[in-house]
Image (cartoon, rainbow, N blue to C red):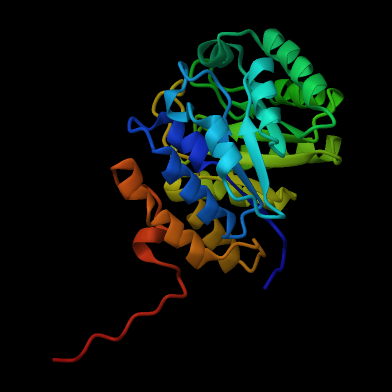
Amino acid sequence: MMKDRLFIQEVSVRDGFQIEPRFIPTEDKIRLINALSLTGLSKIEVTSFTSPRAIPALADAEVVMCEIDRIPGVIYAALVPNARGCERALDCKVDEINVFMSASASHNLANLRMTPEQSLAQFRAIAAQATGHAMLNASLSTAFGCPFEGAVPPELVLQRVGEFADMGMQGVSLCDTTGMANPTQVAHLCEAVLARWPELTVTVHFHDTRGMGLANALAAWQTGIRHFDASLGGLGGCPYAPGASGNVCTEDLVHMFQAMGCQTGVDLERLLAAAATLPALVGHELPGQLLKAGPSTRLHPLPQQA
């Protein structure tokens, strides 16, 4: 069996909760994050320091970030939209600032109401603010396709990654916001980014909109990608990506890689226990498969003969 250390990064409590119609009580968020911290996940994106008017579901960002139990070895990150959000996040002593923009101009305008050039200028200001206080990661949405423009040229994605590297970002996330990626496309783009910027920590962030999330993760792994975003239960989606469903399910992703012999550092049973609490929190069933079927190692008694 192949042994390989992977880093699984949880986004459900930010990416998932931000679009849920039901406000998840602050104490429930804290309780879930504390449980996730004990599973062996390498990073948890705790919240987003956006305007409470823009994302009321995460209006409790400061309280959540300041009151969770921080476990050594776990990176606690936050999404930051602007300089004011960066200041709020730094006041809460986040480990990592995650900034975000889209590869395609139309999605950037729809999602952020900014041109790509305006987003890049904002990134530079945030990088100057955060350098020396927190790690910096840039997430590039629609890196594999745009719901308004269609295919996104790989050359444009590579240009943006180069601009992020020049700003001093330690990491970059290639995000399939729309679930339009396919494994061949993923392999080509990941190979190009890894070859050109070996010093960057490259994360992939897939949605399972068209049922190819795990296949895309496998294709990325085969190129040398070792950092994967995922969402407990498969929660998530994007309001500016029509039809986009949730992210790749964390427990399904961990199960796949562990079955292949990869080392994730994640306690799958603890992860499943945390996932089992989600339907009651959000008020609906989740798309993740492992919680329904159980791990492939789980055996069942032979039916009794009549």
From this view, report whether residue 131 is shown above or below residue 235: above
Tell me where residue 70 appears, x and y as whole percent. 64, 50
Say which residue appears at 75% left-offset and 20% top-offset.
126
* Foreground of the two, 256 or 30: 30
* Relative side of 241 to 39, left or right: left
Tell me where residue 194 appears, x and y as whole percent. 79, 40
The reply to whether residue 139 is visible in this rendering is no
* Relative side of 145 to 159, left or right: left
* Relative side of 67 to 135, left or right: left
Q: Residue furthest left?
A: 306
From this view, report whether residue 105 is shown above or below residue 231: above
Labels in figure, total: 0
Say which residue appears at 58% left-offset and 59% top-offset.
38
Query: Would you identify the image quadrant in which residue 272 lies?
Result: bottom left
Q: Residue furthest bottom?
A: 305
Query: Would you identify the image quadrant in which residue 158 lies?
Result: top right
The N terminus lies in which quarter of the figure? Answer: bottom right
From this view, report whether residue 177 is shown above or below residue 119: below
Say which residue appears at 34% left-offset and 41% top-offset.
282
The C terminus lies in which quarter of the figure? Answer: bottom left
Say which residue appears at 86% left-offset and 23% top-offset.
166
